């Protein structure tokens, strides 16, 4: 095989970024993707990133309210291998494009539906705008540190759309994998509200722990309102300004990395000074404030170029610059990894854009064709190249007779074994998501444990989520005996994940060449922060580092922080706090963004192997995944239009898509369409004069007088409580929700929201006992998903070694020699 998904037809019934990016990945890897566009074209065509989202696809223009066009769309969908639809719940069924109708015509169809809040629960009928979801789950409040005014902040990074894209892709790929066993397709569902909950590494369990043990643990912001750092992470992940006015995000979480930074700052004398030798941990708040100031002052004595010389000479000291816009496309590591593409577009010229999400040695992506012109393939698709049910569209292609159906309720990845070689969160949580789909994951941990286990003061809280559903084997990876055990596990595995810095896997003898020589059928995914070699492969990558270097922070903060030389220390501290918030609080940041991409990459390799590609080496990185998540920014071509950005106060994009304060809280209003305006005016009532005001009669009028309209609406929203506005406007189908408070994770644990929508299930943990966790992201009509609990360090060492054929005596010898732990 040369393409992982060749021979598959995908029909895309969507005008959302999520639907477009689902189709884009499938198309990159060989599927024929047909965009069904409404008359006049998809609204996405007006977006600068459309050439990226639609590359390599086909286009047909159809009015789904016209019976003839609907018949064409139905025929296309009924003949497909995969259908992607992002309608509100019930719309596809009313059109005859739901799974019940299409699946009855084509039992092999994999049909994925993506909604805002799911198909059941109190918010199922709410419009699925990105900011409505972020507001309702508490994310806008979680990002409040970006603004100096009271209240929540508009979040520009499309965290919901990205996570839902990956949840949908994981559901599709898992269903395709299962289809080859059972011969049957099925319905897959995902939602923005549930999927975005996957981006949080530990906030969920921290919030629950603080509720369970209020006297033992409490959460606090990184920096108190009075300017006192509350956590050593302020120092380990320092945000500082250089002498020439560039912001840097340092990456020194582990002790050896922090010691290297102290030397670079000229502070290595502190280790011998009784007053400072506990750095970066200080009980005295005044010392924390003083130490922070000393660090910031030291950083700004050097220019960016001088700091980059230090980075080049000591690989344990590293910081990313805060990049803007599409600068990531020129990052030297992105270019080295081959994850930037240039595509010739007949109308736009050369379009520079992200390359494939994953680089695959055996089934590489093909990114050659530009986005299609509207209805470019309409004549061909209407005529069809096959006859049969669903005419005038093409019918179901001939296929081999299906194999007997799988056992009812079997997980889609049942029987798949994954060997995990990695630490922290960004890559390992991607494997955690596969446990939800039924995969067996054997995690190799050092004898001291994954650093996530001890990263927070309360034991095991940092690792609880990333270890869900896994088996832990603790061993000395640097020993010959430990390496031999890993090789034995690899021989019996289907997938391998490794996420160490460049050179580590080779030094340990667990690199892809070594393990694939042992088991040629392995799909081996390298998923480091930067790469397995190249200019930055050796650099430590943590979530804020990638958030800064990729552009998450600047995309969120807009023009709210000054970036220039000469700022005084108080201005640097204020900017540091805001940029720290913009790069992502625990609820949504680069670690989670990368993790959901890792799960997709592993599943793509698994499906390709099943379809005849065999084992192969694959690469995805935190950096390149961030480029896909920031796709709205990541295109360059001549005369490219600007993307919409929020105001300086981070309230919103315009008067009808922004935050408003009410008499007792905040709401987010999403009413950008003409029928939204009419309903809003009718609900507000004639006494407000909104509908009669000459400044606001037409969309053009409202756009011209946007500031005035925002002022009128701001005064109006102050007249009622937030809950009243949500209830009243939702009743007339206007997008408006009360902004939930932070911490965002608490809203999932609220039974009226989390459990009512099926976002939460209970799972066991050896330390905490039963606790709530996020439910699996994708739901299947036929396959079962699982929701495993956490594990302790080395909990499964003996059972795995016994399975490999080691006797009790041999296991005791290995333990006595310090090769394995318990």
Image (tube, helix red, strand yellow):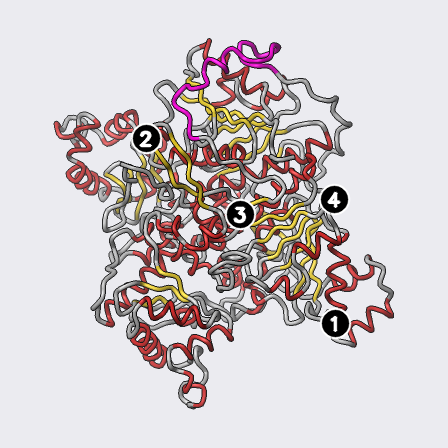
Kindly identify which residue carries mark 4.
415
Q: CA distance from mark 1 to mark 4?
A: 28 Å
Kindly identify which residue carries mark 2.
46
- x, y percentage for residue 170? 58, 40
Q: CA distance from mark 2 to mark 4?
A: 45 Å
Q: Residue at x 58, y 24 (%)?
A: 99
Numbered tag placed on residue 483 in the rendering? none
Q: How many marks?
A: 4
Which comes before the other along the chain, label 1 or label 2? 2
Secondary structure mainly formed by the magenta segment:
loop
Of discs 1 and 4, which sits in the foreground?
1
Of discs 3 and 2, which sits in the foreground?
2
Q: Secondary structure at mark 1?
A: loop
Q: Are marks 3 and 2 in contact (CB under 8 Å)?
A: no
Q: 729 above or below 573?
A: above
- x, y percentage for residue 408? 73, 33
Q: Are marks 1 and 4 in contact (CB under 8 Å)?
A: no
Which comes before the other along the chain, label 4 or label 3? 4
Q: Secondary structure at mark 4?
A: loop
Which comes before the other along the chain, label 2 or label 4? 2
Residue 443 vs residue 194, the one in the foreground: 443
Q: CA distance from mark 1 to mark 2?
A: 59 Å
Q: Residues within 10 Å of mark 1 (few under 14, many from 20)?
A: many
Kindly identify which residue carries mark 3.
596
Q: Quadrant of the N terminus?
A: top right
Q: 6 above or below 719?
A: above
- x, y percentage for residue 112? 55, 31
Numbered tag placed on residue 819 in the rendering? 1
The span picked out in magenta is: 370-395
**Residue 439 visible in the current orientation:** yes
Residue 564 vs residue 432, the one in the foreground: 564
**Residue 127 visible in the current orientation:** no
């Amino acid at each position: 095989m040369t393409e992982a998904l060749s021979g598959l037809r995908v029909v895309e019934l969507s005008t959302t970024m999520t639907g477009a990016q689902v189709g884009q990945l499938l198309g990159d890897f060989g599927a024929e993707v047909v965009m069904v566009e409404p008359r006049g074209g998809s609204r996405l065509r007006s977006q600068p990133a459309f050439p990226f989202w639609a590359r390599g696809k086909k286009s047909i223009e159809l009015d789904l309210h016209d019976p003839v066009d609907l018949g064409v769309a139905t025929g296309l969908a009924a003949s497909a291998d995969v259908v992607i639809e992002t309608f509100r719940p019930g719309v596809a069924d009313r059109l005859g494009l739901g799974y019940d109708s299409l699946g009855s015509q084509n039992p092999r169809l994999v049909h994925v539906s993506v909604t805002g809040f799911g198909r059941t629960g109190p918010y199922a009928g709410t419009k699925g705008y990105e900011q409505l979801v972020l507001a309702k789950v508490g994310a806008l409040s979680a990002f409040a540190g970006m603004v100096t005014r009271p209240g929540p902040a508009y979040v520009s990074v499309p965290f919901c759309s990205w996570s839902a894209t990956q949840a949908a892709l994981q559901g599709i790929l898992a269903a395709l994998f299962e289809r080859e066993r059972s011969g049957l397709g099925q319905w897959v569902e995902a939602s923005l509200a549930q999927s975005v909950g996957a981006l949080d590494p530990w906030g969920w369990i921290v919030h629950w722990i603080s509720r369970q043990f209020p006297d033992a643990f409490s959460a606090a912001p990184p920096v108190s309102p009075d300017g006192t750092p509350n956590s050593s992470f302020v120092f380990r992940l320092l945000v500082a300004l250089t002498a020439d006015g560039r912001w840097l995000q340092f990456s020194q979480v582990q002790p050896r990395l922090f010691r290297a930074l102290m030397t670079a700052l000229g502070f290595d004398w502190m280790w011998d000074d009784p007053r400072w030798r506990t750095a970066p941990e200080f009980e005295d708040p005044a010392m924390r404030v003083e130490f922070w100031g000393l660090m910031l002052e030291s950083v700004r004595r050097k220019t960016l170029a001088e700091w980059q010389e230090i980075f080049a000479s000591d690989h344990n000291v590293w910081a990313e610059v805060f990049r803007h816009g599409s600068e990531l496309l020129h990052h030297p590591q992105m270019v080295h990894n081959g994850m930037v593409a240039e595509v010739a577009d007949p109308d736009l010229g050369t379009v520079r854009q992200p390359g494939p999400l994953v680089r695959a040695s055996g089934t590489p992506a093909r990114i050659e064709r530009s986005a299609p012109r509207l209805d470019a393939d309409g004549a061909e698709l209407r005529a069809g190249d096959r006859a049969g049910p669903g005419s005038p569209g093409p019918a179901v292609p001939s296929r081999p007779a299906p194999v007997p159906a799988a056992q009812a309720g079997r997980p889609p990845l049942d029987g798949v074994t994954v060997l995990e070689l990695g630490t922290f969160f960004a890559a390992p949580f991607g494997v955690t998501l596969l446990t939800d789909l039924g995969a067996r994951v054997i995690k190799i941990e050092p004898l001291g444990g994954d650093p996530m286990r001890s990263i927070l003061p309360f034991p095991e809280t940092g690792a609880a989520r990333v270890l869900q559903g896994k088996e832990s084997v603790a061993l000395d990876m640097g020993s010959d005996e430990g390496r031999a055990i890993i090789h034995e596990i690899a021989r019996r595995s289907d997938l391998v994940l490794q996420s160490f810095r460049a050179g580590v896997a080779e030094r340990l003898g667990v690199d892809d060449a070594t393990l694939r020589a042992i088991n040629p059928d392995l799909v081996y995914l390298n998923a480091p922060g930067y790469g397995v070699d190249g200019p930055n492969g050796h650099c430590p990558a943590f979530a804020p580092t990638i958030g800064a270097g990729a552009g998450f922070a600047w995309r969120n903060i807009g023009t709210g922080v000054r970036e220039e030389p000469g700022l005084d220390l108080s201005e640097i501290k204020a900017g540091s706090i805001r940029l720290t918030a913009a790069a992502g609080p625990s609820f949504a940041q680069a670690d989670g963004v990368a993790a959901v991409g890792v799960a997709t990459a592993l599943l793509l390799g698994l499906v390709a192997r099943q379809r005849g590609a065999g084992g192969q080496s694959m690469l995805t990185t935190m950096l390149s995944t961030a480029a896909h998540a920031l796709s709205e920014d990541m295109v360059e071509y001549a005369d490219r239009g600007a993307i919409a950005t929020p105001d300086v106060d981070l309230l919103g994009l315009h008067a009808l898509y922004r935050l408003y304060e009410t008499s007792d809280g905040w709401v987010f209003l999403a009413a950008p369409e003409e029928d939204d305006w009419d309903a809003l005016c009718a609900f507000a009532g004639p006494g407000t004069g909104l509908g009669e005001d000459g400044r606001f009669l037409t969309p053009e009028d409202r756009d011209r007088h946007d500031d005035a309209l925002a002022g009128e609406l701001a005064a109006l929203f102050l007249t009622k409580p937030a809950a009243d506005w949500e209830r009243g406007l939702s009743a007339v189908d206007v997008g408006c929700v009360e902004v939930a408070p932070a911490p965002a994770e608490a809203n999932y644990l609220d039974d009226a929201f989390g459990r009512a929508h099926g976002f939460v299930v209970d799972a066991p943990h050896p330390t905490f006992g039963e606790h709530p966790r996020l439910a699996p992201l994708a739901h299947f009509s036929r396959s079962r998903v699982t929701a495993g609990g956490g594990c302790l360090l080395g909990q499964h060492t003996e059972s795995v070694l016994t399975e490999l054929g080691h006797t009790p005596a041999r296991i005791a010898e290995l333990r006595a020699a310090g090769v394995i732990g318990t």
